[in-house]
Image (cartoon, grey):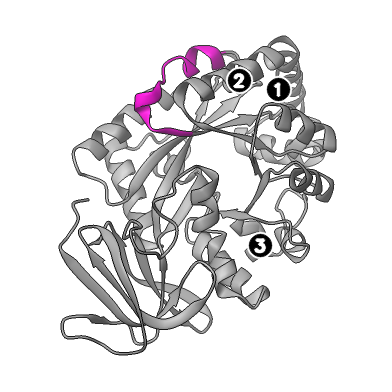
Amino acid sequence: MSPVSETVLANATLVLPDETLTGSVRVADGRIAGIDPGGAVPAGAIDCGGDLVMPGLIELHTDNLERHIQPRPSVDWPHASAIVAHDAELAGVGITTVFDAMRVGSIPSGKARYRAYARGLASEMLDLRARGALRISHFLHLRAEVCSETLAEEMAEFGPEDRVGIVSLMDHTPGQRQFRDLDKLKAYVMGKNNFSEADFEAHVATLKALRDRHGERHEEVAVAEARRCGAILASHDDTTEAHVAVSAGHGIRLAEFPTTLEAARACRASGIAVMMGAPNLIRGGSHSGNVAAAELAGLGLLDILSSDYVPSALLMAGVMLGDLWDDMARGIATVTRAPADAVGLRDRGRIAPGARADLIRVARIDGVPVVRGAWVQGGRVA
């Protein structure tokens, strides 16, 4: 997105890093040029009528692209069209920077097989970005499946030039972490794959055998490859203090979706930022039966939100936290400044002079936040 010359968003409720105030924000050459308090509307400015103006949202973990790639079971939608639609959807709900989650590590054989796709899809994404087809800023988030056959080979296909911002350690071995409750796993897997009881038992045995055979080596590979690519390393579904201790030993500073209060407290003690799902907060609990995001928020143990599988949830949950804490700046920081800081993007995530002019204008209609405009580097994208 090419920067435009100058834009002024005036008579807005500005969500600044530590406060909200009525004022205007001036944008020039893709950056925030200044902040002026008061409700005045200069000639040529956009009158926001008191709407919230906040930094563009930053999404660290979303599976949304997969929904566009496969809109129905067994339907492989043309990838360029899917990527462009995904990009436009995110812009429309206020997300201006995204780390697109792509799985690395496959099981190419068996009834529940899943094959490698990340390298090809990432290349298509990066090509569309280079050609100016995308509205917002895209980075890659490689979800390293340690319980797989091909993790090392797939990770080796990526390098520092690929905008890999995050590598997360994913361990979906049945009976632990997210899948401690085998009955919930059975309902999910059997429904998704049309498995019989025997199919499910065979699937569980296969995954456990893969973890025993490759798990430790794959963790070591993922940690080393994240460093080679210059990516932030994240944990996923930490459940116990022991899990968090291993994460801390790897140098992890971002925990995605810890499943228990015990793990969240251990993360805080180890200086690891806790990221929870926005749908968990909005729905009032985890669909997997894990710890509720609202509980962690109430205890001061929630640092970052992710939309996970519902892009529009990110803005809604950030505003909900602002209401819950009676501090809109603090709530919005969980979807702007905190995720930016977690991945080292110091140029965005806040309204401050010199920052990237990634901004959104948000109205609240019957309590629901509605995006009325989105700008990336000062250029309007929604």
Q: Which mark is residue 178?
A: none
Amino acid residing under circle 3: Leu
Q: Which of marks 2 and 1 is nearer the N terminus?
A: 2
Residue name at image x 27 percent, y 42 percent: 81
**Within 10 Å of the Cα at label 2, are there few (<14), some (14-19), or many (20+) other Cα atoms?**
few
Q: Are marks 2 and 1 in contact (CB under 8 Å)?
A: yes
- Label 3: element kind: helix
- C-alpha separation, residue under disc 2 versus residue under disc 3: 35 Å
Residue name at image x 32 percent, y 35 percent: 125
Per the image, the residue denoted by label 2 is 111
Q: Over which residues does the magenta segment extend?
A: 150-165
* Residue 382 is at least partly visible in this image: no
The quadrant in which residue 351 appears is bottom left
Give the tally of numbered discs.
Answer: 3
Q: Which of marks 2 and 3 is nearer the N terminus?
A: 2
Closest to the observer: 228 or 324?
228
Is 8 located above or below residue 167 in the figure?
A: below
Amino acid residing under circle 1: His
Per the image, the residue denoted by label 3 is 281
